Amino acid sequence: MSDPLESTTGIALAEPPTPAAAAPPSPAAFDPRFAPEEPWRFAPVYPFPRLELVSGKGARVVDRTGRSYLDFVSGIAVNALGHCPPVVTRAIARQARELVHCSNLFANRPAVRLAEALATATGYPRVFFCNSGTEAIEAALKFARARASQRPGRDVVAFRGGFHGRTAFALATTWQPSYREPFEPLVPGVRFGDYNDVAGLDALFDNRVAAVIVEPVQGEAGAIPATAEFLAAVRAKATAVGAALIFDEVQSGMGRCGRLLAQEHYAVRGDLTVLSKALGGGMPLGAVLMTEDVARTLTPGMHGCTFGGNPLVTTAGLAVLDRVSRPATLSRVRSRSRELLRGLAAIVSRHPSVALARGLGLLTAIELAPDAPFDPPALVRACREHGLLVVRGGDRAVRLLPPLVVTSQEIAEALERLEAAIASLETPRPTAGEVG
């Protein structure tokens, strides 16, 4: 065996596998824009290799070859203020010179300040900090069951199409069979109903239900908003049986839907609300907001998180929350949303391969017609070739999640690129021997 590879930092690296041991490279492995090392270095839980991004500013990113793209993925709704917003990067740099981490054994001022700011902005008096959306969902479900310790049952109601994360309890409340089946049996006691089906709620709720979890807008399913009637009925049913209502606002919260919390559009409040994604502005931060009724059932040692609420990530959260919660910012999101949804509706009217456009705020999607000559992955790839980054949603949808600071000009540009990508897939390509 030859000597180990030498990195530019002087650290010895393991050799890549020999051609005989390596998996056959995909065609994309030869694309200079993609990271060629991924297929033999990373755990194979993503489709490798992937487009390698090296820099970003606002709504645009640059790949390893220097090509620029309009980014309407935004880190999957994480980069609310765009890439590298100065207000966040300056705050992180300043805090990194003072205190980065101190564990949950000690208090730190940025976490206290963020907790106070969230209470003021949302009306929830208590918060638990952790690292991600799925961890926050896991905590919220545990807290809801702790609250129900004296009840006859601890069942949880969830809804088809919902996505709540990939840890054990969060996955148990996530409907998608392909996510669930490799890891079954999952945490028991979860009942599933149909989203936006008011009539079906009666069969779901009884005194054995401890909690109900629901997204005001189902993000991964393809930006499907709840109806006002449905969320009001869910709240009423939960109250009637004494169950805790958990709003999963990991994707819909932090201004994404034009209000700080999407539930504000419905005038319905949860007993617990889960935030993450945009909350940290790119730093790993999740939060469970809760009422005093929920908090009083918790005791020291019942739950915890080593990194949760550390000074660095909560400093970033403070900077994001300050900017996103401003009325002018939220008004701007609602205005840009109208422009984007009007543009998407116009594309639907011109292209039979696109069935509909939907969404709330800047959480939007288009759904392909059943007889479209292409599928969502093909459209994602075509958009990329036209300089626009988008992300799948559900079986037939593609989501557009621009940063909340997106401009009207950038929306118009994205719509042009999206329509060009659709047109390129609708136009039959000449076969061998045809004269074009």
Image: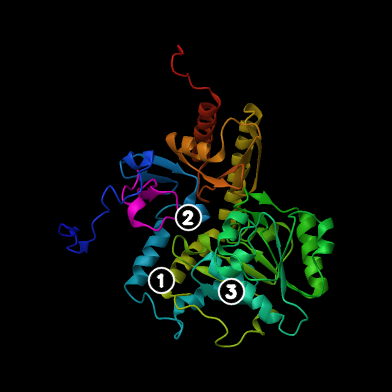
Specify whether 201 is left or right of 96.
Answer: right
Say which element carries label 2. loop
Residue 105 falls inside the magenta stretch: no
Closer to us: mark 3 or mark 2?
3
Residue under label 1, please give it.
312
Mark count: 3
Residue wearing tag 3: 139
**In this view of the protein, which residue sits in the foreground, 279 or 424?**
424
The reply to whether the C-beta atoms of the residues labelled 1 and 3 are less than 8 Å apart is: no
Q: Residue at x 49, y 33 (%)?
A: 417
Q: Is residue 418 left or right of residue 289?
A: left
Q: Tell me which label, 3 or 2, sits earlier in the chain.
A: 2
Vertical placement of residue 223 versus 190, above or below: above
Residue segment shown in magenta: 34-57
Q: Quadrant of the N terminus?
A: bottom left
Using a 10 Å C-alpha cutoff, classify the residue at mark 3 as few (fewer than 14 neighbours), some (14 to 19) or many (20 or more): many
Q: What residue lies at 79% left-to-right and 72% top-to-bottom?
A: 239
Colouring chosen for the image of the structure: rainbow
Query: Looking at the rendered structure, which numbered label has been put on residue 79?
Result: 2
Q: Amino acid at mark 2?
A: Asn
Which residue is drawn at the image coordinates 15% and 59% (left, top)?
A: 3
User: Outermost residue, front direction?
Assistant: 20
